[in-house]
Amino acid sequence: MDRIRIVGGNELKGVIPISGAKNAALPLMIASLLTSDTLTLENVPHLADVEQLIRILGNHGVDISVNGRREKQGEGYSRTIHFTCRTIVDTTAPYELVSKMRASFWVIGPLLAREGRARVSLPGGCAIGTRPVDLFIEGLQALGATMEIDGGYINATAPKGGLIGARYTFPKVSVGATHVMLMAAALARGTTVIGNAAREPEVVDLAECLNAMGARIQGAGTSTITIEGVSALSGARHRVLPDRIETGTYAMAVAMTGGDVTLEGTRADLLETALEAIRRAGAEITSTSTGIRVVRSGGLIKPVDVVTDPFPGFPTDLQAQFMALMTRSSGVSHITETIFENRFMHVQELARLGAKISLSGQTAKIEGVQRLRGAPVMATDLRASVSLVIAGLAAEGETMVNRVYHLDRGFERLEEKLTRCGATVERVSD
């Protein structure tokens, strides 16, 4: 199994190209099930989760063509992928596929909208919490679907003539459930109004793609989204937006180590709250014609308190990385996690590097230390794994991050991008 070896102490200087957003690419790929025409997606990152979803979509009958020529962008790679689903050959999403990636559950929306039926395995829990599917079920029921749970599967059936537009307000903000409702309502009869909808940029990206395919969606990016159903969707060409989580992660790495790095191909408006927290910690962040420039040239890392929240709040997917940054601050900081109930598993691994962190419920108290020391550490999930990389970049000596497959799910060619900016990072194969 691969591991990541880091020797800390180097400033980061140079350019890091930001890849397409995994959290945008996955629902966009699933949207290909809504049309018999070809959906072409540009700027698709090469990640384990993307490759797994390609296999899942193939099971439903999607023909997938990846351009033979990769478009090189610095040390990262973007790809253009064509998805064509002339006929859905299987409306069942089996446990052995859904269990490997939670987002694959989202196929329930397009399958139900296009075929009138779907049999999808319950995804179960994951390392960062239970993440139930109640909101998905209730939202689709509001559109007239009959939902029955049997043997670990949801058997969903649309009414005769298809799903029916309706008003539905989520009791809790859910990005995944908002994605599913957008896709299902796009082909429903009549108008659907979604209240308390997720406002994340990835939701906006999906809505823009669906509109390019012929959907009629207004209000994406606000808490109320209106969808006028259409009888069919066509193909389209759409570019996946930049990955705001990757952007924030590398910005925190620069703030941690010091240096001067331009994050190329990204936008500040995708993560203003997180960038403001990094500024308060002592980094200078400015927008450029090609992306975002992050500089920290000396001075102490300042303690900053943050609370995770749905967009436009501080992203839960950057919580672990920011905690790593705060381990080297000049005082005491607090991080409160409001999205997931079990997202502090990286605390014990950061402690192995010398961090001083204590937990009280959903709040972590971080007492900054003068130095971290390298050690073997174990990644527990995707974002936790990259927090250990950030800590390792500033630690004295060698840090070895095990279970690197977590990183491969969400960070394209991480070690190459960091090495290009002067870090000592390498992949080690056993």
Image (tube, rainbow, N blue to C red):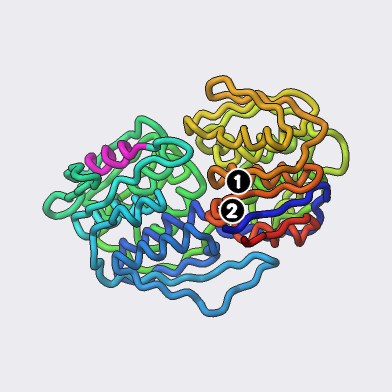
Kindly identify which residue carries mark 1: 385
Q: Amino acid at mark 1?
A: Ser
Front residue of 26 and 371: 371
Q: Is residue 294 left or right of residue 191?
A: right
Disc number at residue 404?
Answer: 2
- Binning the other alpha carbons within 10 Å of mark 1 as few (below 14), some (14 to 19) or many (20 upward) gives many
Q: Earlier in the sequence, mark 2 or mark 1?
A: 1
Q: Quadrant of the N terminus?
A: bottom right
x and y, in percent, of residue 394 in the image = 78, 43
x and y, in percent, of residue 116 in the image = 19, 56
Identity of the residue drawn at 35% across and 64% down: 57
Front residue of 131 and 62: 131
Residue at the extreme left: 160
Would residue 136 be counted in the magenta stretch? yes
Q: Is residue 171 left or right of residue 43?
A: left
x and y, in percent, of residue 88 in the image = 25, 66
Q: Is residue 101 left or right of residue 19?
A: left
Identity of the residue drawn at 20% across and 42% down: 149
- Badge 2 vs badge 1, beta-carbon distance below 8 Å: yes
